[in-house]
């Protein structure tokens, strides 16, 4: 038993949220440490590999948590909750993009952004596979992309994904199945076993 | 779904059982599809391992500033909150694991136990006596029987006393007289001879009753319960060993 101070690394997400809502800065630091990276990756995949936009979304999401920690229901899983908030933010962004697309005579802004970012960011240039994978992800429609990203990139369970997306587990499996089949077909050229 | 992915990642196509092939059939019906899936999953695992993204440090600083502003009042007391209060009363733990409650429980137990050690333990016999008395009161039949018994025993004792000669009241002459009065010398001689006769004759036959008339005739009187003569005539006492009947009377008296 620790009498001096609790170990924040050992605390659950939900316990950290409780401490954070009471003004515990170190609890917030721990939550940020746990989720800032994965959320940045999630936003990048969902927002056309736009790192700047993804970082803005990360900032906005944590700002919401700081201002309104009471929005989190302590009975729920924090991981599920934070990804559902992130997913809703992405959906709102898609809607905004749809409106812009309608106003810009069919020009697809985000694809150009995505392509630019892919070229600018050096982190994916050394891997053709990664580029192809990201392109394949971007070419998926939103509902398949989010299900696949949550399952195979963020590593969430089918049940957690169904809670985040607010759909039943069968639908989640169906979407993941479709996305997996699609990406496997898109990326088969990189498979040395098949191309022998 | 989890099982399907696990099978694809961990096994080769030719290792699959019939059930497993049926299970993954929808996702990977042929060997080529199976290899595609396997390759995709393995590559994604590698990407997860290598791709570690971190937001810029400015974002964290901005959020810290926002946090300080939002919890300004609480942050002022942050030292206490983090170091003492959180340590003593961590709300994220169950109640029984909070140090403050543990200490409070220990103090409570000590406060309850210490007076028990200081308390004087009363002997149990008075309480038992009281219980017996209560029983006696509660049982009138037993009371009557007891009264009868005690009455009977008292009467018997009185009868015995009546039968028995007033030995203690009547002095028993003894050879060890100390007396100035020379007029009693003849009586003494008589007594001594009588005593010696009785001792020689038969010990069972000897009794104080036999001796008493002789003593009475000698006018030896004493009011002392032990048979001590105090007065003008004689100051003497008798050994109880010489007269065991006296001991019986003493026992009845006490």
Image: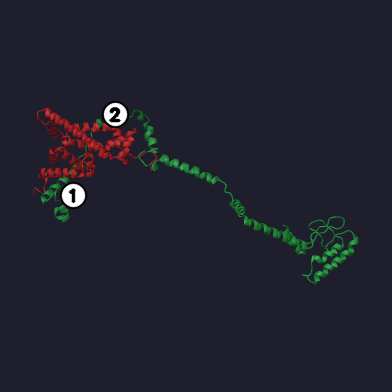
Chain colours: A red, B green
Viewer-nearest residue: B12 or A80: A80
Q: Position of residue B5 (x, y in %)?
A: 18, 48
Q: Which residue is mark 1?
A: B4
Same-chain status of marks 1 and 2: yes
Say whether residue A101 is left or right of residue B55: left
State the residue at coordinates (44%, 40%): B104
Secondary structure of the residue carrying numbered label 2: helix
Q: Say whether residue B196 is visible.
A: yes
Q: Are marks 1 and 2 in contact (CB under 8 Å)?
A: no
1 or 2: mark nearer the eye: 1
Q: Identify the chain of the residue marked 2, using the numbered disc in the image.
A: B
Residue A157 shows in the view: no
Q: Which mark is residue B66?
A: 2
Residue B21 falls left or right of residue A12 = left
Report the front residue among A13 and A178: A178
Residue A180 x/y as whole percent? 15, 44
Callout 1: 10 Å neighbours few (<14), some, many (20+)?
some
């Amino acid at each position: 038993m620790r009498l001096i101070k609790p170990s924040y690394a050992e605390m659950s997400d939900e316990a950290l949220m409780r401490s954070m809502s009471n003004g515990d800065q170190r609890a917030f630091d721990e939550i940020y440490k746990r989720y800032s990276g994965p959320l940045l990756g999630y936003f990048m995949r969902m927002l056309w590999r736009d790192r700047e936009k993804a970082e803005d979304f990360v900032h906005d999401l944590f700002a919401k948590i700081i201002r309104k920690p009471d929005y989190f229901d302590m009975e729920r899983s924090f991981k599920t909750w934070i990804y559902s908030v992130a997913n809703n933010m992405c959906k709102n962004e898609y809607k905004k993009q749809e409106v812009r697309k309608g106003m810009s005579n069919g020009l697809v802004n985000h694809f150009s952004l995505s392509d630019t970012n892919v070229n600018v960011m050096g982190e994916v240039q050394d891997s053709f596979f990664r580029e192809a994978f990201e392109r394949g992800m971007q070419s998926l429609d939103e509902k398949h992309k989010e299900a696949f990203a949550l399952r195979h990139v963020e590593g969430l369970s089918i049940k957690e994904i169904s809670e985040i997306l607010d759909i039943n587990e069968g639908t989640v499996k169906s979407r993941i199945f479709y996305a997996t089949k699609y990406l496997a077909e898109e990326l088969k050229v990189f498979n040395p076993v098949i191309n022998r | 779904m989890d099982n399907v992915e696990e099978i694809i990642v961990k096994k080769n196509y030719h290792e699959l059982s019939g059930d497993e092939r049926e299970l993954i059939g929808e996702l990977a019906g042929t060997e080529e599809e199976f290899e595609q899936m396997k390759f995709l999953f393995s590559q994604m695992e590698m990407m997860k391992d290598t791709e570690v993204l971190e937001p810029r440090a400015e974002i964290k600083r901005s959020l810290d500033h926002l946090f300080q502003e939002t919890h300004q009042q609480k942050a002022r007391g942050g030292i206490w909150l983090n170091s003492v209060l959180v340590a003593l009363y961590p709300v994220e733990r169950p109640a029984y694991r909070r140090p403050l409650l543990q200490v409070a429980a220990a103090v409570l137990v000590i406060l309850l136990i210490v007076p028990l050690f200081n308390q004087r333990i009363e002997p149990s016999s008075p309480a038992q006596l009281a219980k017996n008395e209560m029983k006696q009161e509660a049982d009138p039949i037993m009371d009557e029987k007891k009264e009868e018994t005690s009455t009977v025993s008292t009467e018997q004792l009185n009868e015995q006393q009546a039968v028995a000669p007033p030995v203690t009241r009547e002095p028993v002459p003894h050879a060890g007289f100390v007396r100035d009065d020379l007029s009693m010398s003849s009586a003494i001689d008589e007594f001594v001879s009588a005593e010696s006769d009785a001792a020689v004759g038969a010990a069972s036959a000897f009794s104080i009753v036999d001796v008493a008339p002789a003593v009475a005739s000698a006018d030896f009187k004493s009011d002392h319960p032990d048979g001590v003569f105090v007065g003008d005539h004689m100051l003497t006492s008798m050994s109880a060993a010489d007269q065991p009947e006296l001991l019986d009377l003493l026992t009845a008296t006490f």
